[in-house]
């Protein structure tokens, strides 16, 4: 077996299962989970109907590149959403459908990393654990950039040593961030483009939460948008990852895309042709319908705003937390050790939360997730309100 498999850490939910294995939850309360970031809003009916109407696709091998109509729908959506130059995102060269961002992020690292000594993959910390695993299995080492309250949960890119940038092959950006909801400004994204030019590394922006934002007048900026404002219409050294899982409540459909620099996309297509990661035809056709519709996305955001308003109103008197700019997570400080807090609240209130330290690595003696919990406000409003009420009750009992 590949010896690099031994470098992989247990996934956060494996660690949580081990932590709580001996817990007997309060049986007088129904279980509520704010642990996993799996949307619970209903999937759009018109998407399900599109799948049903196109089940004949089951008898057809899907192509790796996907149908042209899907790539055109994706390119048109991205050009509208991020104010790109019309026609600059060529469906033939700059866009590939993928089976969700998780699969694509991992696979892209395998294709893009040049296996040579001292290669680095740089990522935020806390982080989505796929960045780390992708680095290890592509023969690189992860380098973590702490995201703390002092930096508004955005990495301090100015503090990164030059020798790290020189060894960096991929910088993963997560904006809006998981787990903090922090959003990179357009100015920061432009600065990162300049760094990529200076040190010759790839900018890979995970933007799967970009459509869940709380201020309708301020949608999060995207990396391709920064490129467009710089007149960089070839998106040199830049790729973005987007998904229908969060935007459209379709995590089970496994549909997203990668877009950007054709010099990166075309070799990645070749890799995927061998890898065999093509999206079923009926899912492609349903995805076209999803990318062309914005009303269901607006309805989705309205539900999340309602939940954030209600939950923050309940918890603000007893917890230090900030209303995020985007995503569906609350990143809240705990009054005790985050693992003990998560274990205790499951026992006392039959409520699952994810310890922040499970989403981070210790760097320079600091685990930036320690002392926090991540709350995924994915359930319906009433259930989220009940969860917040239990959290407050538990804190007040300590």
Image: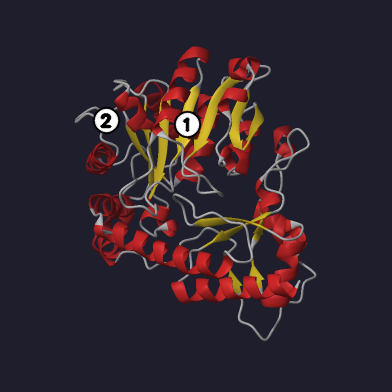
Q: Please state if 300 lies on the left or on the right of 20 as rendered.
A: left
Can I make out residue 278 in this image?
no
Which residue lies under the disc numbered 1?
Answer: 204
Q: Is residue 281 left or right of residue 139?
A: left
**Image x and y of residue 372, in percent:** 67, 54
- Quadrant containing the N terminus is top right
User: For the residue labelled by badge 2, is the local secondary structure a helix, a strand or a loop?
Assistant: loop
Residue at point 20% right, 29% down?
87
Disc on res. 89: 2
Residue 207: image x %, image y %?
43, 42
Point out the image quarter for the C terminus.
bottom right
Could you tell me how many numbered marks the image carries? 2
Instruction: Classify mark 1: residues with Cα within 10 Å, few (<14), some (14-19) or many (20+).
Output: many
The quadrant where residue 317 appears: bottom right
The image quadrant of residue 342 is: bottom right
Q: First in sequence, mark 1 or 2: give its number.
A: 2
Q: Can residue 271 be seen here? A: yes
Q: Residue at x 65, y 31 (%)?
A: 142
Q: In the displayed structure, would residue 145 be above or below residue 77?
A: above
């Amino acid at each position: 077996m590949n010896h690099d498999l031994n470098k992989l850490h247990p996934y956060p939910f494996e660690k949580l299962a081990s932590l709580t294995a001996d817990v007997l939850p309060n049986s007088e309360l129904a279980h509520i989970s704010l642990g996993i970031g799996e949307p619970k809003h209903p999937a759009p009916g018109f998407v399900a109907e599109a799948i049903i109407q196109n089940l004949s696709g089951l008898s057809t091998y899907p192509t790796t590149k996907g149908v042209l109509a899907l790539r055109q729908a994706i390119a048109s959506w991205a050009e509208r959403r991020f104010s790109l130059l019309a026609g600059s995102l060529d469906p033939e060269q700059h866009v590939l459908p993928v089976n969700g961002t998780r699969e694509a992020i991992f696979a892209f690292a395998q294709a893009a990393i040049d296996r040579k000594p001292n290669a680095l993959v740089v990522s935020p910390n806390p982080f989505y654990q796929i960045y780390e695993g992708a680095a290890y299995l592509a023969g690189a080492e992860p380098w973590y950039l702490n995201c703390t309250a002092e930096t508004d949960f955005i990495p301090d890119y100015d503090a990164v040593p030059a020798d790290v940038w020189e060894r960096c092959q991929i910088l993963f950006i997560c904006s809006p961030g998981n787990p903090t909801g922090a959003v990179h400004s357009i100015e920061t994204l432009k600065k990162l483009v300049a760094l990529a030019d200076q040190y010759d590394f790839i900018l890979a922006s995970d933007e799967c939460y970009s459509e869940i934002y709380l201020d309708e007048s301020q949608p999060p900026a995207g990396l391709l948008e920064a490129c467009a404002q710089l007149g960089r219409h070839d998106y040199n050294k830049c790729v973005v990852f987007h998904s229908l899982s969060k935007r459209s409540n379709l995590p089970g459909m496994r549909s997203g895309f990668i877009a950007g620099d054709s010099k990166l996309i075309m070799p990645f297509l070749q890799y995927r042709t061998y890898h065999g990661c093509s999206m079923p035809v009926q899912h492609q056709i349903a995805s076209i319908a999803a990318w062309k519709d914005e009303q269901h996305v607006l309805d989705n955001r309205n539900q999340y705003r309602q939940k954030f308003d209600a939950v923050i109103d309940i918890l603000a008197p007893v917890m230090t937390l900030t209303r995020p700019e985007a995503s569906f997570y609350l990143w809240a400080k705990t009054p005790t050790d985050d693992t003990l807090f998560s274990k205790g609240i499951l026992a006392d209130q039959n409520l699952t939360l994810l310890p922040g330290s499970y989403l981070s690595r210790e760097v320079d003696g600091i685990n930036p997730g320690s002392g926090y919990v991540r709350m995924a406000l994915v359930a319906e409003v009433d259930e989220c309100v009940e969860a917040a009420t239990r959290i407050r009750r538990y804190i007040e009992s300590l």
